Image (cartoon, grey):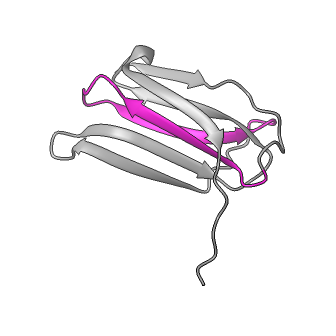
Amino acid sequence: MALVTRRTTERRPGTSANGLVCTVVNVSRKPIGITAQIIDSSGVNVTDFITTNWLDPTAGILASVVSRSRDPEGHSCRITITGGRKHDVTYSLAPAPAQHTPL
């Protein structure tokens, strides 16, 4: 089984007070495995939670994986693809939106 690891462009630590969101989309529509970890400058995983969205859960086909970190020291996203190639996914790393407290 193929294993491919990619790393996004680095952001300066502390550039987002709300942390980062890493979104990885399966553009191949094939049954591949995707993990996405937000890491700090030391390579430590600072991901708080991951949301998995399925295109076809019965066939094991992921639509996307979204990782979120509230740690302002997060600076890049480590993406691991199993059973596929690097061109099977597209990804983005963006500042996380501010959290709103319910009234």
User: Left or right of 30: which side holds 2?
Assistant: right
Residue 63, given in percent of the width and then of the height, sits at 32, 38
At 72% from the left edge and 55% from the top edge, which residue is drawn?
18
- Which span of residues is magenta-colored? 17-43
- 61 in relation to 10, above or below: below
In the rendered image, residue 74, in percent from the top left (x then y), is placed at 74, 43
Question: Which of the pair 78/100 is nearer the observer?
Answer: 100
Picture quarter with the N terminus: top left
The residue sitting at 30% across, 39% down in the picture is 62
Is residue 74 rendered to the left or right of residue 4?
right
For residue 3, which quarter of the picture?
top left
Q: Is residue 11 above or below residue 1?
A: below
The quarter of the rendered structure image containing the C terminus is bottom right
Picture coordinates of residue 25, whole percent (x, y)? 40, 32
**Residue 2 horizontal side relative to residue 18, left or right:** left
Is residue 67 a member of the stretch shown in magenta? no
**In the visual, does 63 lie left or right of 96?**
left
